[in-house]
Amino acid sequence: MLWQNNTNIMATIIDEYCEAFDGLFLRIIVTAKDRDTLEKTAICATALPSTVVGRSEAGIEKYLDESQSPDGRPGAIIQIWVNYSKNAISSLGYEASLRIRQGILVIPTTRIFNALESEDKLDIMPSVGYCGDGFEEEKQVIFGSKTYNMIDIPLMMPGFMIERHLGYKKGIMGGNIWYLCKDEKSALEAGKRAVEELKKMDNVICPFEICSAGSKVGSITAEKYKGSQKGEDYSKIGPTTNHLYCPQLKNKIENSLVPETVKSIPEIVINGATLDDIKKAMKKCIDCTVDIEGVESISCGNYGGNLGKYKIYLKDL
């Protein structure tokens, strides 16, 4: 299947589907006194996506100017996600508290506001408010024309406040797009363009931004040496390299799926509030990169239906 835009460049759209799955997420607004501090905070709070090892992942949805944020200061919308399970609510509360306490609270002048309309809310007092060691104070604070129920935590540099109740919802994780590129230059250009375009959208994040390591389910080495110490060591590592799509292995393994001319395959992973948000984001990733010279084809990753219940076919986008 080919996509023809208004240039002379065509990229092949592989007739493939990506496999997405359920997650649980918070959506918050972080503000700070100035843009530099805000950007540092947003990066600190969302770094290290790690749901693949049973923790949380996060991303910056978009930045807000002073007129868009609750308190008239520079702001950023951040999402924090965990995999959906019977323990997802407690896991989300714990993981979010770690990112808030170590990535936001410790940075001067920051505040946190809820940014998700939901009947389900986390009470953040026990996991974050108690950082005040009994000196924390719950208060009604007016910003603009709205009153917020905030927790004021006294610190060595005063000013940190967080809205006490943060909304959470079920969403969709694992939407993705792969760019099969002839070189590193075109791979980075495609990845950067996709990430920038997605930051213009509401309700979606790229937790890895440009990801160089598309993983797979299971480990061939763990299976090969099953029952031995080596097999056990590899099984503990979690998701391993997707060897079938690893360009540097294409001449070393017999079953490589990397085309001869492809030397780099970046992945854009997408989490979204709804399935429709994921589909729109994936389509945008196709539309904004299809004319890049060196992007030979566009595909996506799946695990043969073993990971998630949502199948999103590129041909339908």
Image (cartoon, rainbow, N blue to C red):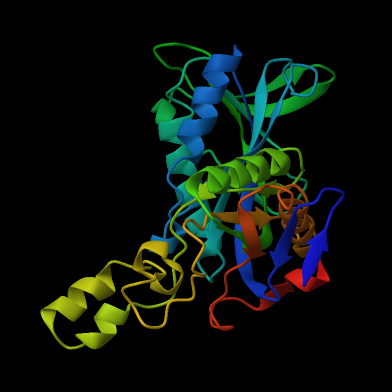
How many numbered circles are shown?
0
37 shown above or below 186: above
33 displayed left or right of 117:
left
302 shown above or below 162: below
Which residue is drawn at the image coordinates 81% and 24% (left, top)?
Answer: 146
Whether residue 208 appears in this view of the structure is no
- For the residue pair 267 and 270, the one nearer the viewer reads as 267
231 shown above or below 20: below
- For the residue pair 146 and 65, the one nearer the viewer reads as 65
- For the residue pair 154 and 37, the one nearer the viewer reads as 37
- What is the residue that sits farthest to the front in this orientation? 8
**Residue 155 place in picture, x, y as percent:** 42, 17
**Residue 98 place in picture, x, y as percent:** 42, 42
Q: Quadrant of the C terminus?
A: bottom right
Which residue is drawn at the image coordinates 24% and 86% (left, top)?
Answer: 224
130 displayed left or right of 316:
left
Q: Quadrant of the N terminus?
A: bottom right
Location of residue 223 by image quarter: bottom left
Which residue is drawn at the image coordinates 45% and 53% (left, top)?
Answer: 212
**Residue 216 place in picture, x, y as percent:** 44, 72
